[in-house]
Structure formats: C-alpha cells, structure tokens
Amino acid sequence: MANGLLILAIVYVAYRQILPQAIATDNPSGISQPRDADSPETASGSRLELTYQEWLDILATEAKVITERDVDNVAVLLGDSLSQWFPPELLPGELEWLNQGISGEGSLGLLRRLRIIDQTDPQWILVMIGINDLVRGEAEETLVANHLEIVRALKQRHPNSKILLQSILPHSDERSTWERRDLLLAIPNTKIQKINDRLKIIAREEKIYYLDLYPLFADAQGNLKLNLTTDGLHLSPGGYQVWSVALQVFFQIQPSINSVNN
C-alpha cells in the first residue's frame, strides 16, 4: 500500500456515480448546517440555548452510556461541527460510533475535554480539528502544537487504541456563501495544506495513522468543491458521502502506519 491516497481517489471516482444528483445547490437536502463557527444549531436550524458546559455534559453522558454497554468495537469521532454533523448511517457499520463533535470547537477546547472519553476504551479514535482555530486567527504554531498535545494525550490515555489523525479540509474561497465569508477569505487554502503537511509529520513521528482527505475535497485550484459543501465551509450530503467512502476504504485496507505516513 505504497500510495493509499491513490486508492482512495480511485474509489472516490467510482463512487461519484452514486452521489446525490441534487448536491450542486446550496442545501438541496434540507439538512441544516451551523451558521457560524461558534454556535451549534438544532436539526431544524434554530439555535440551541446550551452553554459549552452543557454540551460537555451531554457528550459525557453519551460516553458513559456506551461504556456501560461494554462494547468492544467502539470508534470515537473527535472534532467540530464537521464531525458533529456526520450522518450516523454513513459511518462504517462494523464499528459502534461515539460522536464527540461540538460545533465551533477548536483544538484547545478539544484537548481540554479528552477526559470525557477516558473510560470508553475505544478501538479507534478519529480526530479532525483546526478550521475554527484558523477562523479565529489562531497562529499556525499554536494549532500544530495543540495537535501534538492531543495526539500524545490520547496515546497516554488510550494505549490500546488506534488513533487516526485526519487532515483539515479546504474551504471554497471566493465562492463561499457562509455568513462569515470574510474570515474564510483571510485563510489561504495553501496555508491549510502547509498545516496538513505538518500534521502528517506529527502522525509519522508519533506512530499513529494519518488520512489525507484534502485531495478528495479540493478542486484544481485547491478549494473545496462546491458540490461537496453547503456554504463553502460545511459539508453537503455529497461531501459526507466522500468522507464516508474514504473511511470505509481505509478501514477495509487497514494499511500499516508506515505505509500511510510515508
């Protein structure tokens, strides 16, 4: 498996035929997406009147429930709204998924709440975080350093778990329609690619898995493809289908860490 990305790309092309035909519009499915990087929403689009601590309490309860069920094939999804809104039916079915995504989450917030899943003993832990840091103007060095701390903390807390670090996705640049579009335009996608290169190095040096999703979502200019997003930042149903296929292929192949990270 010298080139896992090539395999993912080939599978993606094959699956393009099954992507929903309506995904070219802003939000054809009617699925509501978070309107900004700070406030979560309900499925109907209205704001949730919950504090961050209340969100943490909800996630802690979900983690406790799955722990009490004593499931041996748990996979934890850690991240922000992109993870939070991942349709459960699109997650690989051979695993019991615990979604711990929070809309608006940044890398420091994620680092501070890792204790919530301490008792879950997951088989896999998947991490995607960082776009909100960039939207808020956090320094690249801070974001990379937080990723390193997250990875090391997970390795220490879950020595028997396999950790999969996923790349940060691009945005649609000038074609974005997100209401805080100006914040996206201040983040060159080339910067995101550079950060992803550093995340891959972290994965290699820490001997964990790395999945580079960026090429599957980027157009020829390196921007998020319009048919894979609702607003240039959040994902459309088609975007989640691409992510889903990438994960399914990854888990089916189960490449060695060295082949993934080289």
Image (tube, rainbow, N blue to C red):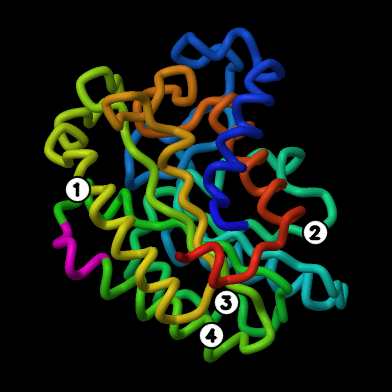
Marker disc for residue 70: none
Q: Residue beneath label 3, please?
A: 116
Secondary structure beneath disc 1?
helix
Q: Which residue is mark 2?
A: 95
How far from the left and from the top, in percent, is residue 181? 21, 28
Q: CA distance from mark 1 to mark 2?
A: 34 Å
Per the image, label 2 sits on a secondary structure element best described as loop
Of discs 1 and 3, which sits in the foreground?
A: 1
Which residues make up the magenta segment?
138-143
Query: Mark 4 to mark 1: distance in Å?
Result: 27 Å
Q: Residue at x 47, y 74 (%)?
A: 113
Residue at the spot x=45%, y=65% of the render? 262
Q: Which quadrant of the view contains residue 242?
A: top right
Rendering quarter of residue 218:
top left
CA separation in Å, label 1 and label 3:
31 Å
Residue 54 visible in the current orientation: no
* Amino acid type of the residue that numbered disc 2 sits on in the rendered structure: Leu
Mark 4, other Cα within 10 Å: few <14 / some 14–19 / many ≥20? some
- Residue lying furthest front: 2
Label 3 or label 2, whichever lies nearer to me, is: 2
Is 42 located above or below residue 119 in the figure? above
For badge 1, the amino acid type reads: Lys
Which residue is tagged 4? 155
Q: Along the horizontal axis of the image, is 177 left or right of 215?
A: left
For label 3, the SS is helix
Instruction: Tell me where residue 75 appears, x and y as whole percent.
Output: 70, 64
Q: Which mark is first along the chain, 1 or 4?
A: 4
The earlier-in-sequence mark between 4 and 2 is 2
> Please, what is the dominant secondary structure of the magenta stretch?
helix
